Amino acid sequence: MSTSSLPSSITLRPGAVRDAIVDRLVRSLGKSVAGATRRDFYDALAIAVREALAERWIATRTRVTQAHVKRICYLSMEFLLGRSLINALSSFDDGLIDEVRETLLSFGHNLEEIAAEEEDPGLGNGGLGRLAACFLDSLATLGYAATGYGIRYDYGIFMQVIGDDGAQREVASSWLGMHNFWESGRGGIRYLVRFGGHCKSTRDDKGRVQYEWVDTHDVWAVAYDLLIPGNRSPTVNHLRLWSGRAVTPFKIEEFNHGNYAAAVADQIDAKNLTRVLYPDDSTPQGKELRLRQQYFCVSASLQDMLAQHLADGRGIDELERAFAIQLNDTHPALAIVELMRLLVDDYHIGWSGAWQMTRRICGYTNHTLLPEALETWPVAMFERLLPRHLQIIYQINRDFLEAVSAKYPSDMDRRRRMSLIAEDGDRRVRMAYLSVIGSHKINGVAKLHSRLMRETIFADFAELWPDRFTNVTNGIAVRRWLKQANPGFAQLITEKLGSAWENDLEDLERLKWAVDDPEFRQRFRAIKLENKKRLAKTIELLLNQKVNPEALFDVQVKRIHEYKRQLLNLMYVIVRYLRIINNEAPDAVPRVVIIAGKAAPGYWMAKSVIKLVNNVARVINSDPRVGDKLKLCFLPDYDVSLAQEIMPAADLSQQISTAGMEASGTGNMKLSLNGALTIGTLDGANIEIRDAVGEEHIFIFGMTAEQVTQRRAQGYSPAHVVENNPELKRAIETLDSGLFTPDNLADSTTVVDRLMSDGEHFLVLADFDSYAAAQDRVDALFRDQDEWGRQAIINALSMGPFSSDRSIREYADNIWGIKPVI
Ligand SMILES: *Cc1c(COP(=O)(O)O)cnc(C)c1O
């Protein structure tokens, strides 16, 4: 094709895919078709797809403005989006992706390989960030007007590399290294965010006190938008991410005096604000930069919300009908205070009116009961960074404690317990309490978690305001976790049902007949085997380790944390290994145990677990007596893209947290939806998964949350447990012998010492007997391949309630009070 024959603007659409790709290659990238690399094809396609989405995006904004519907501001410090290309392509409902695939083939390229050119934007740590991404997908698919707000970290979550010693090393990774075509810089959208300074109060002409926040140090927040397409939907929403820029990027006088460093210092400071995501999952570090990030995100987002509201020509008193704000955990809790500041100081609304409005607008989602995960900030840090906000917090607290005293006169201890300011030790602001007090609804993320939340950390508040507490069980985006991750299975379902299930997972119920259909079962198993072969190739590529695709693929993938109990899994792997080499398990079912996940760089025990897993793996995988009977594979750098490969290949899903500690889990849902059977404790959403699939189709073991509490109260003694289980004892002794860690015995003993310490908080070994017995049931069932397949299908088809579409509808109806635009 000669370049001059190209028409002026070719929208990517059926029938024009080839022209559109060539057009972007030549015109946008300046590449000839013959000279184009795989990366060039990726870039050309990404540009073409983004442009096609842009039309739907503009139309969505027009519809939203005209319809005057309430909009959602979903505030989150993390969004773990995963790659965009295939997600965007498959959102068009006219077979566009098939034509793209064929066109690329004609150029000698494979769509999946092209898509893998994209850097996974890892702007989150784990479950909480991925939930936010699934929610944005559902909001767009269901046609709600919603904007995600977050931070455009230059460096998202680190890349995990495993060293020769088996230990995790963190490598900084910028998702912006290659130009990212999915985001558009919105240079015109920027807001000043202020820090520091001090407060002045004056009286206005009516004698009312007015507060002024002066002598501040200011930074620009500039907007970058990432498009969020709804699946087979006219809606395209966006995720707006803020990046820091200096007010005076270059100080020419400093430069003229020969001081280049001082000339650019402000710009460096401003950019440092959004340079890096804190890599701690559920344990905040309490660093000043983190508080700055939180305020930066919140302030820019609220200014943006108000600017849109006023641009729509609506009055400030209408705000609560126009917007709802959802706080994804306490990280954006300052939104409550910032909204008060804007309403009271800038819009001169009376305090109590502003407070009512703020509370009606904000909702708070709690994600954890772990005491160490509940954010508090030193009052002194607030005073220095956000002096006006501290004043507002004090005022909110005074009003609140007055109401508490009115209801519970002379209960001083209750006042102390419920205060926004913790007075023990250095004075701190309790962000979770602020979130509760400033929200009209507070939700947990699974039924058990919501109940425990009411009974434990927020008991006093639930007593005061029982109606404000509710539950919305988490869910997952069906598009990413089935349609895109498992195209074989998705196609099989569509062949039988049509494609409505993509946007209505409950539709899978209609396939229940297929459970007893031999042809369907045979096809399901063939698809699973293909997925396992693909993962086996990836494992060989990553670890140089061959695995047998016919073996049971036993998967535990999630952040490494003591409460998630990767060590329970590891102890059982060691027990199996010792059975094999002692000829005690002649008919053991061959297993490939797959573990993946990152540890927070400062979480020493989690890093020790990774190192030990790798050391144990080295011994097991190279022992000729073991062969195919057992392989242990730690896959490095778990992220959304790797998860999309692992989920469809799993037979067994390990969800084995200490009961009462995993708020919900969403990995459990992804695996079950892809036809893995769960071995799990009665924790988080596992309980609801059990109810959905039926207790005969899930391997439940271990103590309940109540039993965990009791056991801790009684005083748990691991030594006693080990003494009564000879296999467990042998495993501990083997670790202590240094068999797995010949170079450094301490790599084993530090972990063993933790497991064996009196009162060990996560009760790992206390659940071992019950876990091992459940694993025996797993083996027994897997020997009957047909029955295993049947139960796997039952699991997948029962996942209707775990779509994030269902979660979002519940938020929309019970918390936000919104209707779709379409
Ligand atoms: C789903 C997901 C998680 C959450 O997994 P859990 O098992 O619920 O902890 C974490 N990280 C990634 C990359 C995910 O896709």
Image (cartoon, grey):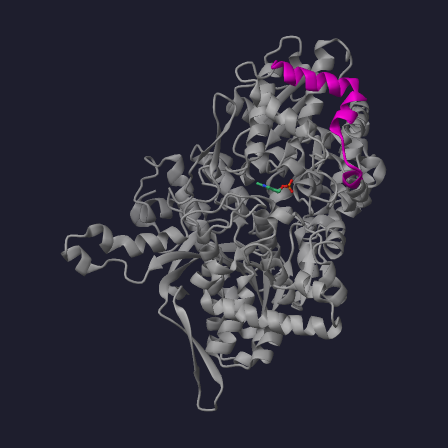
Q: Residue 798 or 511: which is nearer the viewer?
A: 798
User: Image check: 392 left or right of 153?
Assistant: right
User: Which residue is rendered at x = 17% and y = 60% of the image?
Assistant: 253
**623, 427: nearer the viewer:** 427
User: Who is closer to the viewer here, 435 or 184?
Assistant: 435
**Residue 261 location (% of width, % of height):** 23, 50
> Whole-percent x and y of residue 814?
71, 65
510, 473: nearer the viewer: 473
Q: Main secondary structure of the magenta part?
A: helix
State the residue lying farthest toward the bottom.
206
Q: Quadrant of ligand 1?
A: top right
Give the quadrant of the C terminus. Answer: bottom right
- For the point 65% across and 55% down, which residue is it? 366
Can you see residue 547?
yes
Left or right position of 735 against 56: right
The image shows residue 821 at horizontal and vertical percentages of 60, 67
For image coordinates 49% across by 73% down, the residue present is 342
Residue 268's place in the image compared with 209, above or below, is above
Q: Which residues are magenta?
A: 711-739
Task: Give the answer, above or below, for where 629 lies relative to 182.
Answer: above
Residue 497 in the magenta stretch? The answer is no
Residue 144: horizontal and vertical position, in percent?
Answer: 60, 63
Question: Going by the image, does 498 lie left or right of 106?
Answer: right
